[in-house]
């Protein structure tokens, strides 16, 4: 399969006073287009830093990050901002929905940065809400929705621009087990039906089972790679 993400000799370090802290150490990684990848590791292993670098939220100390045909590690802040708007969808642990806006308005937000007409925005928002099963909740504000429903709104917002890459940082970390299972099954279904590439950071081994491939990081290095077999319980679509 063609890689959508190519990471070569990636290093990321920070300075804390006179101390240099190495977060990622000469890391090499390829992610094929359409793969659901989970990143795991203890706190401080570098998994969230790696996710942020691939998503263009941070810049490497050295090395190369290519997403699609773009070398994002060499982009300026303004170039990265424009690139993220069109190519990356973000799913967060605590949803990051604006409480004064409806589900519809929260999903529409990323589209306001693109040169689209009101009718084009409406069509894309309605499609995204339908994909996550929330067409009947579009007028509700976050406070009127359950945690699982709020995360569905977050997923719809991530999908609404039809991005090349979905990045999810602990997307089930604030959910009960039933809601978490529903969200993970939804991600699997979106990956299968729309062939989206998903990179997910998680501490939860049960959540990682939903990914096709799991990479374990320790001290900034990839130390283990696991390919999960397809699971029959993931075969159905999400209601």
Image (spheres, helix red, strand yellow):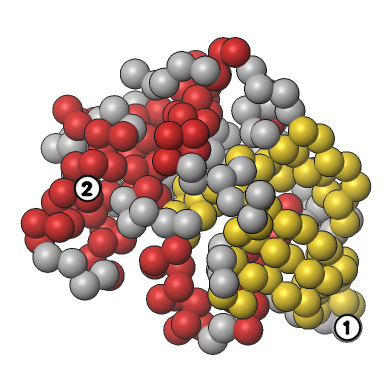
215 displayed left or right of 73: right
Toward which corner of the image does residue 155 lie, by quadrant? top left
> Which residue is nearer to you in this view: 226 or 22?
226
Instruction: Tell whether label 1 touches label 2 (CB within 8 Å).
Output: no
> Quick one: quadrant of the C terminus?
top left
- Going 75% across and 38% down the picture, which residue do you hit? 214
Which callout, 2 or 1, points at the residue further toward the start of the chain? 1
Residue found at the far left of this picture: 119
199 displayed left or right of 113: right
Position of residue 171 measured from the top left corner of the image (x, y, whole percent): 53, 39
> Which residue is nearer to you in this view: 6 or 203?
6
Q: Is residue 98 visible?
A: yes
Name the residue that disc number 2 marks: 125
Q: Residues within 10 Å of mark 1 (few under 14, many from 20)?
A: few
Position of residue 35 measured from the top left corner of the image (x, y, whole percent): 61, 43
72 displayed left or right of 50: left
Name the residue that disc number 1 marks: 18
Q: Is residue 200 visible?
A: no
Q: How many marks?
A: 2
Marks 2/1: CA distance? 49 Å
Position of residue 210 measured from the top left corner of the image (x, y, whole percent): 62, 28
Position of residue 180 measured from the top left corner of the image (x, y, whole percent): 52, 25
Helix, strand or loop for disc 1: loop
Asked if residue 67 is positioned above or below residue 97 in the image, the reply reads below
Residue found at the far top of this picture: 232
Asked if residue 175 is positioned above or below residue 233 in the image, the reply reads below
Asked if residue 72 is positioned above or below residue 146 in the image, the reply reads below
């Amino acid at each position: 399969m063609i890689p959508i993400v190519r990471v070569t000799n990636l290093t990321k370090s920070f300075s804390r006073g006179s101390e240099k802290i190495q977060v990622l150490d000469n890391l090499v990684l390829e992610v094929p287009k359409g793969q659901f990848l989970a990143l795991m590791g203890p706190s401080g292993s570098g998994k969230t830093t790696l996710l942020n670098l691939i998503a263009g939220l941070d810049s490497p100390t050295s090395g190369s990050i290519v997403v699609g045909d773009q070398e994002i590690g060499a982009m300026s802040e303004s170039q990265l901002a424009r690139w993220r708007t069109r190519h990356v969808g973000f799913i967060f642990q605590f949803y990051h929905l604006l409480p004064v806006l409806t589900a519809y308005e929260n999903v529409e937000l990323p589209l306001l940065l693109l040169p689209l007409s009101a009718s084009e925005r409406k069509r894309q928002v309605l499609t995204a809400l339908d994909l996550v099963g929330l067409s009947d909740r579009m007028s509700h504000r976050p406070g009127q929705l359950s945690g699982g429903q709020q995360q569905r709104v977050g997923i719809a917002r991530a999908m609404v621009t039809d991005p090349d890459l979905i990045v999810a940082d602990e997307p089930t970390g604030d959910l009960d087990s039933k809601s978490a299972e529903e969200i993970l099954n939804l991600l699997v279904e979106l990956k299968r039906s729309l062939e989206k590439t998903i990179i997910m950071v998680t501490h939860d081994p049960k959540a990682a089972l939903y990914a096709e491939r799991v990479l374990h990081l320790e001290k900034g290095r990839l130390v283990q790679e696991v390919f999960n077999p397809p699971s029959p319980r993931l075969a159905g679509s999400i209601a």
